[in-house]
Amino acid sequence: MVKPRLKRHGKKQRVTYRIIAIDTQSRREGEAIKEVGFYNPRKEQTQLDLFAIIALLEKGAQSTETVRDILKRAKVPEQVGIKLQSKIKI
């Protein structure tokens, strides 16, 4: 299964994150299938490739909680008309 997930990037104390599509069994710093965005928590900057994110979510990808929060802050679900799944209970 493919998930949109954060990949750590940058120096110590100056971290930024790339939002990537990656297989769930790969480690965080593993090889990404596709880079779909960028997030800088220090400056609250977000850059998203909406077409790629929508394509992933429509194919059944489930984003991590952090990526889901970033997408909600950027108001992606309202712009596109998709519903993000909250945490799945087993």
Image (tube, helix red, strand yellow):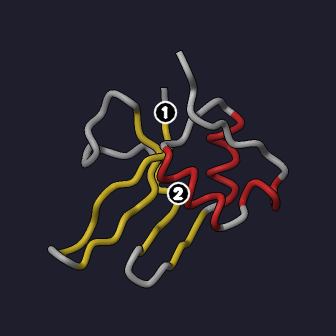
Category of crowding for the residue at label 1, using alpha-carbon neighbours closer than 10 angstroms: few (below 14), some (14–19), many (at least 20): some
The secondary structure type at the circle numbered 2 is strand
Residue furthest to the front: 89
The type of residue carrying mark 2 is Val
Tell me the quarter of the picture where residue 19 sits: bottom left
Establish if 85 lies above or below 88: below
Tell me the distance, in whole angstroms, between the alpha carbons under discs 2 and 1.
Answer: 13 Å
Residue furthest to the left: 12
Residue at the spot x=50%, y=79% of the render? 45
* Left or right: where 16 falls relative to 76: left
Residue 39 location (% of width, % of height) = 45, 69
Residue at the spot x=72%, y=60% of the render? 76
Residue furthest to the top: 90
The type of residue carrying mark 1 is Val
Establish if 49 lies above or below 22: below
Residue at the spot x=15%, y=74% of the render? 12
Q: Earlier in the sequence, mark 2 or mark 1?
A: 1
* Left or right: where 13 falls relative to 70: left
Q: Name the residue nearer the viewer: 41 or 8.
A: 41
Any mark on residue 2, and which? Answer: 1
Residue 41 location (% of width, % of height) = 41, 74
Q: Name the residue nearer the viewer: 3 or 86.
A: 86
Q: Which residue is mark 2?
A: 36
Residue at the spot x=53%, y=73% of the render? 46
